Image (cartoon, grey):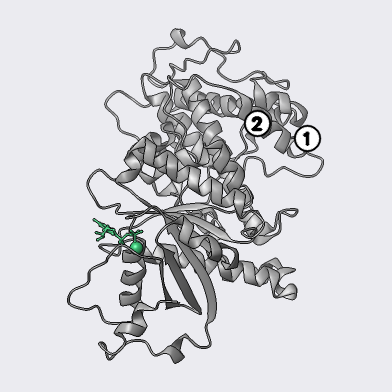
């Protein structure tokens, strides 16, 4: 094993003594990737950051076979190996806990290079499926600060829509990270993520007592919990908080989503849905957005940390106020976003090994997708706007609007109009069903009203 640090250890007096590595749990990590991706630079930038003073000149040469260093980080000693190419790594893949697949962000803009990387990764995952069963697999997009670098969201999208890769990654909680080894940007995110994952896996597999008690896991795995999802806001309860075992919507939840997932929309009409590829904790909390940002983010169907009743009312309000609202697009974005959140939740649950339970702490406040429920709330907001119209020239943000409409705060308000049997049914999730208890308050024709905010153009009969 060639340890660069052993060769140069005489040169720097404050190199971390080997004893410091002792007492830490050693974690084998393999960095794979095409030549020139920056694997050696990444390793030695880490080494100089955490183990030794950086020399005045630091030059990397193409790796002949492999390099390895031990980087102390938190309670771990990351034993990081990087290889010249895949061939050089084959004998070492089976004994690793982490695979980092590194790609060059600039090179990835070339379709041939990008597809080669995906092909290589698929091959590794398939060939070493058994050996890598418990490994953490991540992709690191290096040189992200360079001109011509790809957007990692786009790259992530390519990876998760590649059928072979998706198959290979299905048993891994794969994530994509960006970094720039030249400037050391993004290093901590990668190391923090790995530390956290390893900590969680160890807690589940080694300490049986702890793994059986979710509460003891909580503090050790903060990032999987949608912490910012637990709002302290005074209004609005979870729309589906009436869910219980006898709730037909709950029972048909997975079925309902899988069906909805099959609904196809004309992609040329709408921006392509972006599935969440960032680490869970990086997703934005919708309550932190200003109205305009929130609307833009939503209409691009980009992932949120959660999407609650409050967010639904908000997008309804903002889109009604826009002259060219497009309800189909709204439904499309909402469906995509909620599906993304559902996938993240499953991921988080799988991380905790508690897939068969829904521990209280993991419950976020996201609504579930339902066409009837969405259109019902759009209609309620529309009605509220009739009663509290926004005058031309008046700027009223959603928060102020909502403050004046307490009737919207209660997520259970639908019960006056619908029986739970209808409102929570699978059919209602898939298509709009008119209320069975009493008619919607403003079942008007959009063209018959001149007030701003009343021009809801929904192509549903009831409207
Ligand atoms: N601009 C920029 N250049 C980088 C970055 N990381 C590495 N490089 C450069 O990319 C080139 C290749 O880097 P290496 O670290 O040798 O890449 P490698 O993956 O180890 O390559 P092989 O050993 O040949 O497999 C070198 O010239 C590095 O200086 C980065 O983040 N930004
Ligand atoms: Mg190298």
Could you say where residue 157 lies in the image, as x and y percent from the top left?
46, 39
Which quadrant would residue 82 be assigned to in this image?
A: bottom left
Left or right position of 128 against 356: left
Q: Secondary structure at mark 1?
A: helix
Q: Would residue 276 be visible to someone looking at this image?
A: no
Characterize the local packing of mark 1: few (<14), some (14-19) or many (20 or more) Cα atoms within 10 angstroms.
some
The answer to whether mark 1 is within 8 Å of ligand 1 is no
Left or right position of 114 against 420: left
Question: Which residue in the structure is indicated by mark 1?
Answer: 248
Mark 1 or mark 2, earlier in chain = 1
Could you say where residue 163 lies in the image, as x and y percent from the top left?
57, 36
Which quadrant would residue 257 be assigned to in this image?
A: top right
Question: CA–CA distance between discs 1 and 2?
Answer: 16 Å
Q: Would residue 96 be visible to someone looking at this image?
A: yes
Viewer-closest of 377 and 43 = 43
Q: Which mark is residue 414?
A: 2
Quadrant location, the N terminus? bottom left
Q: Quadrant of ligand 2?
A: bottom left
Q: Does 325 sit above or below residue 298?
A: above
């Amino acid at each position: 094993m060639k340890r660069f640090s052993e060769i140069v250890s005489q040169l720097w007096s404050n190199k971390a003594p080997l004893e410091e590595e002792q007492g830490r749990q050693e974690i084998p990590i393999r960095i794979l990737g095409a030549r020139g991706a920056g694997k050696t630079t990444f390793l030695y930038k880490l080494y100089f950051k955490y183990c030794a003073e950086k020399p005045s000149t630091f030059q990397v040469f193409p790796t002949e076979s492999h390099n390895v260093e031990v980087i102390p980080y938190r309670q771990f000693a990351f034993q990081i190996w990087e290889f010249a190419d895949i061939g050089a790594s084959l004998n070492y893949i089976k004994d690793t806990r982490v695979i980092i697949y590194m790609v060059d962000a600039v090179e990835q803009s070339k379709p041939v290079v990008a597809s080669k990387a995906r092909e290589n990764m698929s091959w590794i995952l398939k060939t070493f499926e058994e050996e890598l069963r418990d490994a953490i697999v991540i992709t690191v997009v290096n040189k992200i600060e360079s001109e011509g670098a790809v957007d990692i969201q786009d790259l992530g999208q390519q990876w998760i829509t590649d059928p072979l890769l998706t198959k290979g990654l299905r048993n891994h909680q794969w994530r994509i990270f960006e970094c720039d080894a030249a400037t050391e940007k993004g290093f901590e995110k990668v190391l923090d993520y790995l530390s956290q994952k390893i900590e969680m896996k160890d807690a589940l597999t080694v300490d049986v007592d702890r793994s059986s008690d979710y509460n003891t896991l909580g503090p050790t795995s903060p990032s999987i919990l949608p912490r910012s999802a637990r709002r302290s806001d005074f209004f609005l309860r979870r729309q589906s908080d009436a869910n219980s075992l006898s709730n037909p919507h709950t029972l048909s939840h997975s079925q309902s989503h899988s069906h909805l997932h099959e609904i196809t929309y004309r992609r040329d009409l709408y921006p392509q849905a972006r599935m969440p590829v960032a680490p869970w904790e990086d997703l934005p909390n919708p309550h932190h957005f200003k109205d305009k940002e929130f609307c833009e983010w939503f209409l691009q169907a980009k992932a949120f940390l959660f999407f609650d009743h409050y967010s639904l009312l908000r997008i309804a309000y903002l889109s009604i106020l826009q002259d060219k609202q497009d309800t189909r697009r709204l439904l499309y974005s909402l469906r995509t976003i909620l599906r993304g959140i559902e996938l993240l939740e499953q991921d988080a649950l799988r991380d905790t090994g508690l897939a068969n339970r829904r521990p209280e702490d993991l419950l976020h406040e996201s609504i579930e997708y339902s066409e009837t429920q969405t259109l019902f709330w759009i209609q309620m907001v529309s009605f509220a706007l009739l009663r509290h119209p926004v005058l031309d020239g008046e700027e009223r943000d959603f928060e102020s609007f909502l403050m004046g409409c307490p009737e919207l705060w209660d997520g259970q308000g639908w019960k006056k109009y619908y029986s739970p049997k209808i409102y929570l049914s699978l059919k209602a999730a898939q298509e709009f069903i008119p209320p069975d208890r009493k008619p919607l308050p403003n079942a008007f024709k959009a063209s018959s009203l001149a007030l701003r905010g009343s021009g809801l153009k929904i192509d549903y009969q009831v409207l």
